[in-house]
Each structure stands twice: as C-alpha cells, then as structure tokens.
Image (tube, helix red, strand yellow):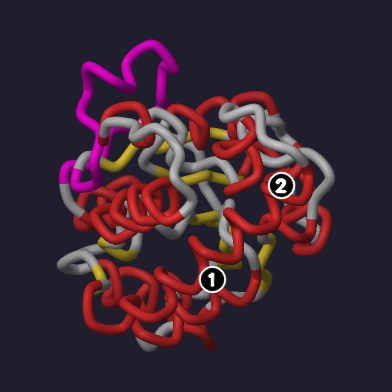
Amino acid sequence: MTKFTTLLFDLDGTLIDSIRLILDSYHHTLETHGLPARTDAEWLSGVGTPLRVQFAELGVSPDRMEALIETYREYNIAHHDARVIPYNGAVELIRRVEQEGFRVGLVTSKNRQGAIRGLTLAGITDHFDVLVCADDVHHPKPHPEPVIMAMAQLNADPDTTLFIGDSTHDMQCGRAAGVKTAAVLWGPFGREQLESTRPDYWLETPADLLAILSLTP
C-alpha cells in the first residue's frame, strides 16, 4: 500500500455540506437577472468548477458576468453561516491527519474569501498548510494546475500525495496531476456519477480514509 505523506482536500461536498446553498444561490441569481431557469441537475453537473465557468455556459457579456457573480456571492454570503455545516466526522478527520503529521492542503474552486469562510465555520482554518483557491490559478479543475500548485507549495511528491474530493472534476484534476484520488460518497454524487473517473479509493465515511492511512479510528 502506498504510504501517503500529503493529503489534499476539496471543500464543498467533501468537508462542508454547502451544496443546497450553492444550488439555491444559482437559482436566485438567474431569477434576479431575469434569465431562464436551470434545473438542480444542470447546475450540479458543474459543481466543483468556479462561478465563471458555470456562468460562461449562459453566453453572457463580460459586464453581465460580473453582475451575476456579485449577485451570487451576496446571496451565498448572506445565508452561508445559517445553512452550511461540516459533514459528520470531517472536522475530526482534518484535525486527526494534521496531528498525525501529514501535510494537509485545500484545493477548491471557491475563491479564497469564500473558502476561508467555510473553513472558519467548521473551525479548521488553522489545520491546513496551504490553500489553493479559484483566484490562485489560471486553469481551474478539472485541469491539474490546482493540485500541481498545492504540491509545489508543500514540496510534495505526486507518488505520496492523495487528493480527496466528491466530484468528477476533482477526480480528473487529481489523475491529470499524477496523484492518487479518493472519491467521497457522503457528498452530492454517488458511485454511478463518479465511476467513469476511476478513483483509486472509495470513501463511504471519513473513517475509511483513516483505514487507507493505516490509522485507527
């Protein structure tokens, strides 16, 4: 079994349960700007990519794009702390792996301000050695740049790095960066949505990651 030394985590759908708020933020944004509605499934397929990637599918002008992003963020921030909670066992998992001496990074498609808000809500901001957010990269997930950047900042070896996420974008990003991938199944996606990306590991619960790392629960 590979001996991992570096663990990279996605945020939304992996550590914090924010998916319903994300979807409602998209719905609110389209309604506010008088744009045709999209279904939960249409938005969900792009969860794990930055706002600009999602809104680009609407074919809007640059000015409209900025207005959509502003509306989304205003709604999301206004409701964030009341509607977002950490997944069961996620906080304890992060604290445990940091305590055990693993290098721990966050690789998210949220901007830095939003990512820090989520980590602060969960009480785990200080447990990450590095944050790579949407505003840090030129090419977001599923491009490998976010994971490659995190490894560079941690001086990590791809052979001993594991990327843990919930979406196809996470799995594709990790595989393209040459690291092992672990797909969590407590987020919005099931095996049927993720199987095509061939994760190296499946995680039903956070305790499954401890087993992979040869740690007792």
Q: Nearer the viewer, residue 139 or 55?
A: 55
Q: Which residue is mark 1?
A: 115
The quarter of the displayed image where residue 76 is located? bottom left
Query: Going 60% across and 47% down the picture, which residue do you hit?
Result: 50
The quarter of the displayed image where residue 54 is located? top right
Q: Nearer the viewer, residue 188 or 160?
A: 188
Query: Going 53% across and 74% down the picture, which residue do you hit?
Result: 101
Q: Is residue 24 left or right of residue 69?
A: left
User: Percent position (x, y) of residue 136?
Assistant: 79, 59
Q: Quadrant of the C terminus?
A: bottom left
Q: In the picture shown, does residue 200 fall above or below 99?
A: above
User: Percent position (x, y) of residue 204?
Assistant: 17, 42
User: Percent position (x, y) of residue 47?
Assistant: 43, 40
Q: Earlier in the sequence, mark 2 or mark 1?
A: 1
* Residue 5 visible in rendering: no
The residue stretch that appears in magenta:
186-204
Q: In the picture shown, does residue 78 fall above or below 170?
A: below
Q: Nearer the viewer, residue 14 or 217?
A: 14
- Residue 146 is tagged as 2
Query: Going 67% across and 25% down the picture, which residue do you hit?
Result: 176
Residue 197 is a magenta residue: yes
Q: How far separated are the C-alphas under marks 2 and 1? A: 14 Å
Residues packed near mark 2 inside 10 Å, few (<14), some (14 to 19) or many (20 plus): many
Q: Is residue 116 left or right of residue 85?
A: right
